[in-house]
Image (spheres, rainbow, N blue to C red):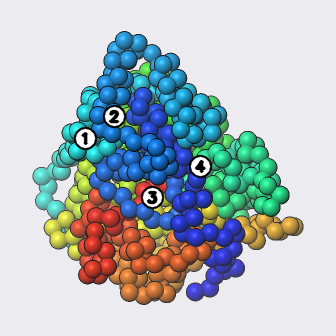
Amino acid sequence: MPRHGVSPGEGHPRSSWETESDRSRGFRRLRLLWIGLAVALVLPDSLVLWAPVGAHPLPTQSHPARFGRLVPQLRNAFGWWNLTCPVCKGLFTAIDFGLKKEPGVAWVGSMATKLCKLLKIAPPTVCQSAVQLFEDDMVEVWTRSVLSPSEACGLLLGSTCGHWDIFSSWNVSLPAVPKPSPQPPKPPAPGAPVSRILFLTDLHWDHGYLEGTDPDCENPLCCRQDSGLPPASRPGAGYWGEYSKCDLPLRTLESLLSGLGPAGPFDMVYWTGDIPAHNVWHQSRQDQLRALTTITALVKKFLGPVPVYPAVGNHESTPVNGFPPPFIQGNYSSSWLYEAMAKAWESWLPAEALHTLRIGGFYALSPRPGLRLISLNMNFCSRENFWLLINSTDPAGQLQWLVGELQAAEDRGDKVHIIGHIPPGHCLKSWSWNYYRIVARYENTLAGQFFGHTHVDEFEVFYDEETLSRPLSVAFLAPSATTYIGLNPGYRVYQIDGNYPGSSHVVLDHETFILNLTEANEPGARPHWQRLYRARETYGLPSALPAAWHDLVYRMRGDTQLFQTFWFLYHKGHPPSEPCGMPCRLTTLCAQLSARSDSPALCRHLVPDGSLPDVQSLQPRPPFC
C-alpha cells in the first residue's frame, strides 16, 4: 500500500508497550489520582481511570472489574500500598460521617490534595488544581447518590467487597408496531448523485501550545507554556504539533480548515465535539466557552454557507465528563453550556433542534428531503460521567426520544443518520445494549452512524440480536484532528448516496486525510494535508455496507499484511514501531465487532482454539479521554 510519504518509523521511535508506559505516563499517574479523590468522593474516572493509553488496544471488562483494576495498578506503582476491603469500607464510612457532620468540601479537598501529593500521583500543582476543580461537583453527586460504603467499595474493588447495582439493567420501550422485514439498501444507479460529508472530531485546541517546549513533561498535557524546556538531548515541540501527549495550536486547525479545497466540495459537515484541550485539571467555564466560540467562528469562516451539524463531546464541560441530567437545576446544571451552544450554532440549527439542545444537548432535524439527522449527547451513556451515579436509567429520556424519532422516520419512509461523540460500544452496558436493540429494530431506517472520541480510525459492527451473525449496521469511528497521543492530525470525508428521490443515504466510501507532522515540522516546510487512503480501494471492499466490514475483520484475522495495513491506518500513518502480534491483533479486531459493550460472545469466532483462553479479555480498549 502506498504510504503517501509517511512511514511507521517517523517521529519519536517507540514500541507498542511504550505507547502506554511513556506516551501517557502523565495520564497514568493522573489516573491514580482517582484513588486519592475516591477516598473522598469517587472522583470521576474521566480524569484518571480511563485515561489515554495511547493508540494501542487494551482489554476492558464488566464495570466492577474495571474499577478493580485500579488496585493492581496501585500496587505496581507503589509497592507498599495495599487498599483492602475493610480499609475501603472504613474510609467511605468516615466520608459519610464527615459529610453529615460538616457538609462542606474544604476538609474533603484538603485530604484528597494531601493524599495525591503524598503518593506523588501527579505534580503538586496538578493535584491542587484537580481537587479544587472537581470537589464541589463530586460532593454534590456523592450526597445526592444512594451509594453506600459497601456499594462504593464493591464498585472500586469488585463484587467480593460489596454489592453494587447502581448501573443495573433497564430497558427502553419499543413501539408495538411490528418490525418490517429486513431490506438491504440497493446500490445506487450509475451516475446517481453522490454527496460528500466532511467529518470533524476531537479538534482539542490548546490555546497554551508553545513551540519548543518539552513534549514529555511531567504534567498530563505537554507542549505548553507550563511544560518547561526539554533537555538538550531532545527536540522541543514542533511548530504545527507534536507526536506526544500534546494537543494542537490554533494555526494547525486554521491550516486544516483552510486546506480543505482538494477534499471538497462538501454538502454538509458533521462535527462531533471535543473542542477544548486535555488540560482537564485546570479549566474554567470561561475557558470552555472561549474554545466553543473561537473554534465555531473558525469553522464558519472557512466553510461559509456549508451547513454544519455538531454533537456534544465529553470535553466541552468542566469538570470534564460532568454532564448532569436535566433534572439537576441551578449552578450545577449544564444550562450554561447548552445555552452557549444554542447561541453559537443558531445559524446552523432550526428552532426545534435548538429547543432540545438547550434541554439536554441533543436534537433532530431534516437536512434534506428523505433524510433525518439525529445528534445524540453520548455523555448520557458515558462510563466517565460521574453524575450518572445518581441515576443512569436513560438519562434525560434520550433513548426513548430516539425511538420516537426513528419510528416517525419509519412511518414517513425517511432514512436516518445518527451522529455522536462517544461510540456505543464504549458506553455503560445497559445503555449500550438498549441502543443495540434500537439499531436492530430500525435497521431499515438507519442509514448511517458516525462517531469519534477514540482518536483512531476504526468501526463497530452491529448484528441481529437473535444469532449475532447477520451484520445489519456499522458505526464509523473517524480519527481525530488532534495529535493526542502520538498521532498525525487528520479528518474524514464520507461519500453518501446523494440527494434524489429514493436515495438510500448510505455510506458509499470514505477517505481519510492527514498532515504528516514529520514533514510539516521540517525547517522551511509548509503544511500539506494529503489523502492517506480511500477505504474501498485500500481494503478491497465490494461496498461500504455492514457485511463488507464484517468480512474485512475476518480477512484481517488470517492475512497479516492486510492487518498491518489496517494497523498503520488505524494510527493515521504513525503507528508504534513494535509490530502488533496475535493477541494485539485479536483484541483490535474484536473491538471492530463489538458495538455492544461487555459482549464477549461477539468475539468468540475470532479466537483460534487455544490461542487465547480468556475470551472475556478480548473486548474493546478503553476510550481515549
Percent position of residue 138, x then y: 43, 29
Q: Quadrant of residue 517?
A: bottom right
Nearer to us: label 3 or label 2: 2
**Label 2 SS:** helix
Q: Marks 3 and 2, Cα distance to the nearest angstrom?
A: 37 Å
Residue 17, compared with residue 159, is above or below; it is below
Amino acid type, residue under disc 1 in the picture: Cys
CB of mark 4 within 8 Å of CB of mark 1?
Answer: no
Horizontal side, residue 277 vs residue 41: left or right: right
- Name the residue located 35 percent from the left edge and 46 percent from the top edge: 67
Task: Mark yes or no: residue 200 visible.
Answer: no
The dot on residue 161 is 1
Amino acid type, residue under disc 4 in the picture: Gly
**Label 4 SS:** helix
Q: Which residue is mark 4?
A: 26
Q: Residues within 10 Å of mark 3 (few under 14, many from 20)?
A: many
Q: Marks 4 and 2, Cα distance to the nearest angstrom?
A: 26 Å
- Name the residue located 37 percent from the left edge and 78 percent from the top edge: 553
Q: Residue furthest top?
A: 101
Nearer to us: label 4 or label 2: 2
Q: Quadrant of residue 269?
A: bottom right
Amino acid type, residue under disc 3 in the picture: Phe
Percent position of residue 495, x then y: 50, 71
Percent position of residue 9, x then y: 66, 76
Q: Marks 1 and 3, Cα distance to the nearest angstrom?
A: 36 Å
Q: Nearer the viewer, residue 157 or 346?
A: 157
Mark 2 or mark 3, which is nearer the start of the sequence? 2
